[in-house]
Image (tube, helix red, strand yellow):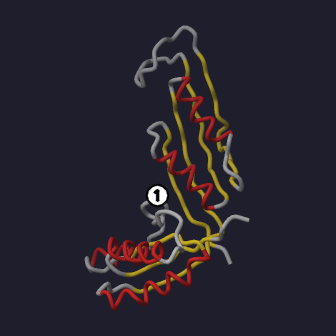
């Protein structure tokens, strides 16, 4: 079973809050890599209330950290220790994450790019599912030539759209690939709460 995660909302200066907590967890051996921040990863995590508060009170900031369950006690310890180090932060909310989901669309005009992108969706990480809203379509036109985006016809064209959902780690790995690819447009990424 993959590690269970929690979204921990911390009030305080974004960079300092995350940096302090990440450093503390790493120092205690409770962190195996960088600590993901939900909004930085592309998830819609900030509530309307938070956005309003931050716009009305620029010093009021929150950060949404994605933390493995096994690290929660050390994170709470880190937030408690922050005050004695001059870092004013507090935990606003902790909620379990059952999984994640994002919607996407794609358009590629090169067979090389199309094969690479299709490979991501054909070899999904364990615990991750693909729901194509529109099945991937490959169209070939032997009369056309070139791969220019604005060409009237393309020799190769791949189009598709859908959603990816499942375990947070697997969805996050695929979301990072898609976010960094100009030919894939991520429309909406959300964290799904659990019990």
10 Å crowding of disc 1: few (<14), some (14-19), many (20+): some
Q: Secondary structure at mark 1?
A: loop
Residue at horizontal 55 percent and vertical 62 percent from the top:
190
Q: Position of residue 98 (x, y in %)?
A: 66, 69
Q: Position of residue 145 (x, y in %)?
A: 48, 11
Left or right side of 128 for 87: left
Residue at horizontal 37 percent and vertical 72 percent from the top:
19
How many marks are shown on the rendered structure?
Answer: 1
In which quadrant of the rendered view does residue 101 lie?
A: bottom right
Which residue carries the number 1 mark?
A: 42
The quadrant of the rendering that contains the N terminus is bottom right
Q: Nearer the viewer, residue 130 or 172?
A: 172
Above or below, 32 against 138 in this view is below
Left or right side of 51 for 100: right
Left or right side of 195 for 39: left
Residue at horizontal 54 percent and vertical 72 percent from the top:
67
The quadrant of the rendering that contains the C terminus is bottom right
Q: Position of residue 155 (x, y in %)?
A: 53, 16
Q: Position of residue 66 (x, y in %)?
A: 52, 69
Q: Nearer the viewer, residue 29 or 117?
A: 29
Furthest residue in direction right, as rendered:
1
Above or below, 84 against 18 in this view is below
Q: Nearer the viewer, residue 156 or 26?
A: 26
């Amino acid at each position: 079973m993959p590690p269970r995660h929690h979204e921990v909302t911390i009030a305080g200066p974004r960079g300092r809050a995350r940096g302090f907590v990440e450093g503390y967890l790493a120092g205690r051996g409770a962190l195996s890599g960088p600590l993901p921040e939900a909004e930085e990863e592309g998830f819609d995590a900030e509530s309307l209330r938070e956005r309003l508060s931050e716009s009305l009170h620029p010093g009021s900031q929150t950060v949404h950290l994605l933390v493995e369950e096994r690290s929660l006690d050390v994170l709470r310890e880190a937030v408690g220790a922050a005050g004695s180090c001059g870092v004013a932060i507090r935990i606003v909310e902790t909620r379990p994450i059952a999984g994640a989901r994002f919607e996407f669309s794609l358009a590629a005009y090169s067979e090389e790019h199309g094969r690479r992108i299709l490979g991501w969706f054909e070899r999904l990480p364990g615990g991750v599912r693909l729901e194509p809203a529109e099945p991937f379509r490959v169209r070939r036109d032997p009369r056309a030539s070139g791969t220019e985006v604005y060409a009237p016809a393309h020799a190769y064209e791949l189009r598709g759209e859908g959603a990816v959902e499942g375990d947070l780690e697997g969805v996050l790995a695929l979301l990072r690939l898609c976010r960094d690819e100009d030919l894939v447009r991520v429309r909406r990424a959300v964290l799904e709460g659990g019990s």
